[in-house]
Image (tube, grey):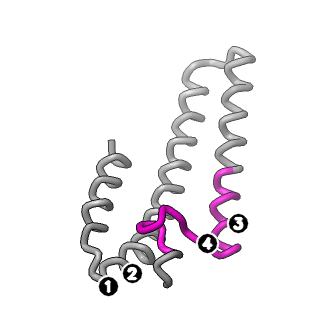
Amino acid sequence: MDKKDCCCSERHKDRSEEEKKKLMNRLKRIEGQIRGIEGMVEKDAYCPDILVQVSAVNAALNSFNKELLAKHIKTCVVDDIKEGHDETIDELVKVLQKVMK
């Protein structure tokens, strides 16, 4: 992978169309779930029913994060370490700390 393609160095990542499509599909499903929750609030749905849907959205976002993080580690982090950019490890640790709050 060329240095310009790595998300760790230039804050940019060229994704394949397939990868981009998968990520966007997940986000669109999550967006739909959020709209569903909005509708539930507007219709005065029972609180536990809304909470269950919010939990589903949280699970979907966590799944999205796992997929994106795995791809980041397998590409950007590995490539940077191979090129001797060990500061990428510190960046990854900081990201993990933020994601795991």
Q: Amino acid at mark 3?
A: Lys
Query: Which numbered mark, 1 or 3, is in the foreground of this view?
Result: 1
Q: Residues within 10 Å of mark 1 (few under 14, many from 20)?
A: few
Query: Which numbered mark, 4 or 3, is in the foreground of this view?
Result: 4
Query: Which residue is farthest top?
Result: 44
Q: Are marks 3 and 2 in contact (CB under 8 Å)?
A: no
Query: Which numbered mark, 3 or 2, is in the foreground of this view?
Result: 2
Q: Is residue 2 magenta?
A: no
Q: Amino acid at mark 2?
A: Asp
Out of 31 and 1, give the one closest to the viewer: 1
Mark before the other along the chain sequence, 3 or 2: 3
The Cα atoms of the two marked residues, 1 and 2, are separated by 5 Å
Residue 79 got which mark?
2
The Cα atoms of the two marked residues, 4 and 3, are separated by 10 Å
Which residue lies under the disc numbered 1? 82
Q: Secondary structure at mark 3?
A: helix
Out of 99 and 86, give the one closest to the viewer: 86
Which residue lies under the disc numbered 4? 15
Q: Are marks 1 and 2 in contact (CB under 8 Å)?
A: yes
The Cα atoms of the two marked residues, 4 and 1, are separated by 20 Å
Q: Secondary structure at mark 4?
A: loop
Q: Amino acid at mark 1?
A: Lys
Q: Residue at x 70, y 58 (%)?
A: 25
